[in-house]
Image (cartoon, grey):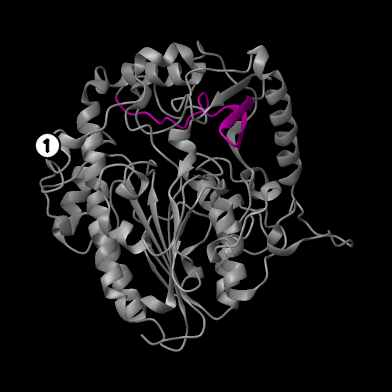
Amino acid sequence: MKHRASPNIVVLMTDQQRVGYTAGEGGPDTMPRLDALMADGCRFERAYTSSPLCVPARTSMLTGRFPTAHRVRQNSNAKHATYEQDLLDVLGDAGYSLHFSGKPHMHAEPSRFESYSGPYFHDGGPRDTAVHEQFDAWLHELDHGVAEEPTPFPVSAQLPHRIVDSAIASLDAAPEDKPFFLFASFPEPHNPYQVPEPYFGMFDSEVPERIADADDLHLLDWRFRWLRHLIEEKRPGYDDLWRRYRSNYMGMLRLIDDQIGRLVDHLAPVAEDTIFVFLTDHGDFVGDYGLQRKGAAMPEALMRIPFAFTGPGVARQTRSEPVSIVDLLPTLAECVTGQIPVGVQGRSLAPLLRGDEAPRDEFGSIFGELGYGGISYDEDSRPPLHFPYSGRRFDELNSVTMGGEMRMLVEGRHKLVVDDRGRHWLYDLEADPAELHDLSEDAQCRELLSAMDRQLVRWMMRVADDLPTGSYTPRTRPHNWRWA
């Protein structure tokens, strides 16, 4: 490894990591190595996913486009991704060697990388030893549940450890005359919620209280209650384990953090020439509302994500502008090439990373999407699903909870959500962080609701697709800041 003119780029991605569960975000001290890495960089404290499920969000990250444009709206249709150039195209054309290790859940095929270690999913990955095979079988038997005892396998069998082993081996073999791009994608802290000692008991005494539980579900959209009823029918009494669930979740974060630290230590000789990015695809209920995983509407628990950069040209700062996972591609593209591909809808954050002021018109709000399409179901619906109603197995991302359409706008302290039936939900996120009190029918909020409706319409026009290109050239602005 040697110093290069173009920065190396390392994207560290976790799966289903809830904002507020690290000390750097004001929570428990679960990821000290990551916090130390990003201490000299830029943390965006109000970052959002484009959609609160894996493949649409990851496709947005790699294409810089919202789901209605890239056309991947559920986890089962990554192959339908629509774009002109994605992040791999941009960096490959710029002379980077491309490396992947971990959970894919993305449109990019293995052949697009010089090295590819995977796929790792939530019940296993490539198996180099008998212990790996035994551990993966044990994970599969856990069936995305919550382990009540420490995992009876060593840390070396855990997926984050194996992913970092492969990443280190790939970078050691990478060509010395090219900058490298590494996408290290950890399947955790996504379910199943398990961890060995010493992580299993590490946070038992630090489990934070819930901001809401099942008693509050009558205040929320019916999708929350439908999901609660489904899980309770499948796994009676599951919510009794919410403290164990949270403790395991925090232990998983510390295990990931130790492996991130191992990778960062290995890259110490080239760290000053490397941009590190940390983010996740979406959040997790982590027991709030009496729910696990994800799969109901667009609460902050699912929509907000950790998002941070450090490296050459990145000023030490914490920024409060609302930003999005779709902003990653244009940011890295501008940093590396000075140009942003056609069809990209995200905004380059490169000037913000340097410490420049963010124009209010451009960075005063952010947008998100949810929905598989069709017409929304009702609370008493029981249509055929892709899994049986009997037995323990379930998928929270199903035709009922994901059917129809939802759109979200966050502007200042307020959040607006609308659905395909014309229903509005308006929340004051500062006064009501659990989003339990809908203000959309409050006469005092009528003007605010109207203004946010208008801004949501602007966003929906903004994310209309510029592709395919034709004979005419659309007007553009620097950094893809359309409203600046």
The answer to which of 358 and 156 lies nearer the viewer is 358
Q: Which residues are magenta?
A: 392-418
Quick one: which residue is furthest to the right in this view? 471
Where is residue 25 drawn, in percent x and y? 37, 46
Which class describes the residues within 10 Å of circle 1: few (<14), some (14-19), or many (20+)? some
Rendered residue at 26%/64% (across/down):
261
Where is residue 162 drawn, in percent x and y? 25, 61
Residue 448 visible (yes or no):
yes
| Membership of 280 in magenta stretch | no
At label 1, the amino acid type is: Glu
Residue named by callout 1 = 149
Rendered residue at 47%/27% (across/down):
296
Classify residue 396 as left or right of residue 406: left
Examine the rendered structure and indicate whether residue 303 appears above or below residue 473. above
Examine the rendered structure and indicate whether residue 237 appears above or below residue 341. above
Rendered residue at 31%/46% (across/down):
22
Where is residue 223 drawn, in percent x and y? 49, 20
Examine the rendered structure and indicate whether residue 300 appears above or below residue 315. above
Rendered residue at 24%/67% (across/down):
262
Q: Look at the image and tell me in which quarter the C terminus lies.
A: bottom right
The answer to which of 359 and 183 lies nearer the viewer is 359
The answer to which of 316 and 125 lies nearer the viewer is 316
Residue 126 visible (yes or no):
no
Element class at badge 1? loop
Where is residue 71 drawn, in percent x and y? 64, 46
Examine the rendered structure and indicate whether residue 15 appears above or below residue 427. below
Classify residue 56 as left or right of residue 140: right
Q: Look at the image and tell me in which quarter the N terminus lies.
A: bottom left
User: How many labels sit on residues?
Assistant: 1
